[in-house]
């Protein structure tokens, strides 16, 4: 199962967390085997760059010379040997057998030989070898299993010492975080069903089992959402603003929209959730289904946020959780750190700037915009806000951290920034802006 998931990631561009969910539902492994397969797939994706460097050394040739299917077999063997409690003989034998089944008997000798060389060192030994001639951020990246540009992005904000802690936080798989939909469910209901309390959000709980087994989740009265995402939506709801409808500008897949819908309703306001991609708009509608019978049910539209389907000044508050590199969510998206490229940044930043301009144009005078990214990168965060504000004279920054006063360590100048090592959340960035 782990092999099929890994091939889907590399051959079809699938996302590990999504393909894993589908495979678990399809294969129906018992709990113990499902946990093993989950760690094998996610862990292999998380440390893939490190394993590729190790395989190149152990195999004496670049990984590009291996057939892609063979390389995935070897990656799975590396994770068992170096990061799981699997005895060496079992890890090698199982991986050789896997290779014979999914590729052919002809590759068993190569798989056996390479993995025997991998097993000659433990993971720390291999990392020491790979980092031997490196220093600075390059060494930081190798020792914490991240691409250099991602490690640099964290170091630019935190400094190298604390960046080391934060990158380590990205390597720790999180518990599944749940959110209750305000007005539909309560945290005590989830706790009574076996969940644990959340740490920061008053709407959060954490669960170790399958969240879909909970009645509130099945009925759409609760959902899966990282606490960082909950907090940025909550902060927007707490800022004083004019009366009027709220907008979620880039709403897919719908977690923040569902929380905002409840928060808006509690203040007597309604929500419009806009999503450009039709299939993601369907996910938003599914997330909002619990509010279908409300007095002011949220409205989902399929629209391109850069070409707004509404008049200027139509909203009192706008959440602009823009597309970004996602390097703040690496705890939950194990394959993302190797999938994203620094070359993607210029196009993303241009899109982020356009979306923020639209968000600001979409609020009435006195209205509030929350600009949010799941990334701490300077270009996607402070850089976007600074560039947009330099071109306008009708915007002021609202200090963000005071709207989350109980969340210690979230200050980033006038903005708020959450961190995996400080808050055990995604590294969410928040800027609050008011249109004068």
Image: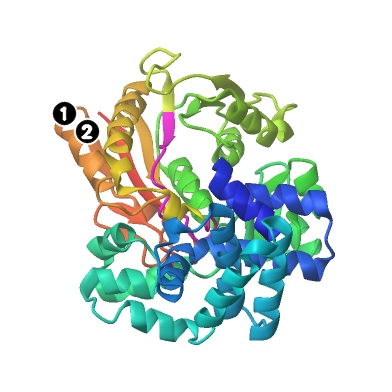
Q: Residues within 10 Å of mark 1 (few under 14, many from 20)?
A: few
Q: Is residue 307 above or below residue 385?
A: above
Relative horizontal placement of residue 420, taking residue 256 as reference (left or right) = left
Q: Residues within 10 Å of mark 2 (few under 14, many from 20)?
A: some
Residue 52: percent from the left, percent from the top?
Answer: 45, 65
What element does badge 1 sit on?
loop
Alpha-carbon span between mark 2 and mark 1: 5 Å
Residue displayed at 42% across by 81% down: 126
Please give the label number shown on residue 391: 1
Residue 298: percent from the left, percent from the top?
Answer: 62, 26
**Image quarter for residue 295?**
top right
Q: Which residue is mark 2?
A: 388
Q: How is the image coloured?
A: rainbow
Please give the label number shown on residue 229: none
What element does badge 2 sit on?
helix
Magenta stretch bounds: 317-334
Labelled pair 2, 1 in contact (Cβ < 8 Å): yes
Residue 269: percent from the left, percent from the top?
Answer: 55, 28
Choose between 247 and 373: the one closer to the eye: 373
Choose between 363 and 389: the one closer to the eye: 389
């Amino acid at each position: 199962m782990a092999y099929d998931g890994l091939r889907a990631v590399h051959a079809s561009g699938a996302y590990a967390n999504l393909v894993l969910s589908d495979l678990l539902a399809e294969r129906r492994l018992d709990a113990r085997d499902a946990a093993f397969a989950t760690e094998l797939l996610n862990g292999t994706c998380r440390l893939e760059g490190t394993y590729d460097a190790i395989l190149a050394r152990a195999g004496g040739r670049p990984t590009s010379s291996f057939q892609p299917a063979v390389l995935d077999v070897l990656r799975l063997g590396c994770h068992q040997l170096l990061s799981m409690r699997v005895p060496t003989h079992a890890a090698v034998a199982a991986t050789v057998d896997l290779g014979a089944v999914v590729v052919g008997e002809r590759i068993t000798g190569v798989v056996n030989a390479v993995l025997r060389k991998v097993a000659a060192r433990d993971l720390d030994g291999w990392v020491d070898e790979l980092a031997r001639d490196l220093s600075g951020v390059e060494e930081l990246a190798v020792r914490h299993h991240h691409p250099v540009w991602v490690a640099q992005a964290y170091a630019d904000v935190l400094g190298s010492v604390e960046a080391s802690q934060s990158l380590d936080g990205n390597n720790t798989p999180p518990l599944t975080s749940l959110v209750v939909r305000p007005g539909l469910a309560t945290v005590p209901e989830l706790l009574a069903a076996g969940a644990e309390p959340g740490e920061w959000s008053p709407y959060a709980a954490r669960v170790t089992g399958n969240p879909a087994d909970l009645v509130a989740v099945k009925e759409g009265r609760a959902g899966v959402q990282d606490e960082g995402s909950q907090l940025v939506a909550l902060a927007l709801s707490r800022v004083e603003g004019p009366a009027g409808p709220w907008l979620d500008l880039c709403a897919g897949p719908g977690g923040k929209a569902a929380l905002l819908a409840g928060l808006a309703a509690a203040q007597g306001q309604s929500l419009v959730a806009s999503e450009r991609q039709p299939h993601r708009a369907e996910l938003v509608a599914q997330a909002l289904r619990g509010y279908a019978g409300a007095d002011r049910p949220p409205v989902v539209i399929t629209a391109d946020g850069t070409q707004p389907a509404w008049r200027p000044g139509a909203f009192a508050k706008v959440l602009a959780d823009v597309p970004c590199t996602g390097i703040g969510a690496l705890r939950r998206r194990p394959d993302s750190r190797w999938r994203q490229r620094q070359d993607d940044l210029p196009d993303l930043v241009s899109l982020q700037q356009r979306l923020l301009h639209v968000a600001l144009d979409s609020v009435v005078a006195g209205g509030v915009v929350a600009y949010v990214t799941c990334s701490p990168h300077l270009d996607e965060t402070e850089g976007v806000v600074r560039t947009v504000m330099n071109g306008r004279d009708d915007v002021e920054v609202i200090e963000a951290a005071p709207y989350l006063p109980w969340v210690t360590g979230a200050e980033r100048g006038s903005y708020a920034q959450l961190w995996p090592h400080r808050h055990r959340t995604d590294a969410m960035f928040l800027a609050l802006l008011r249109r004068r």
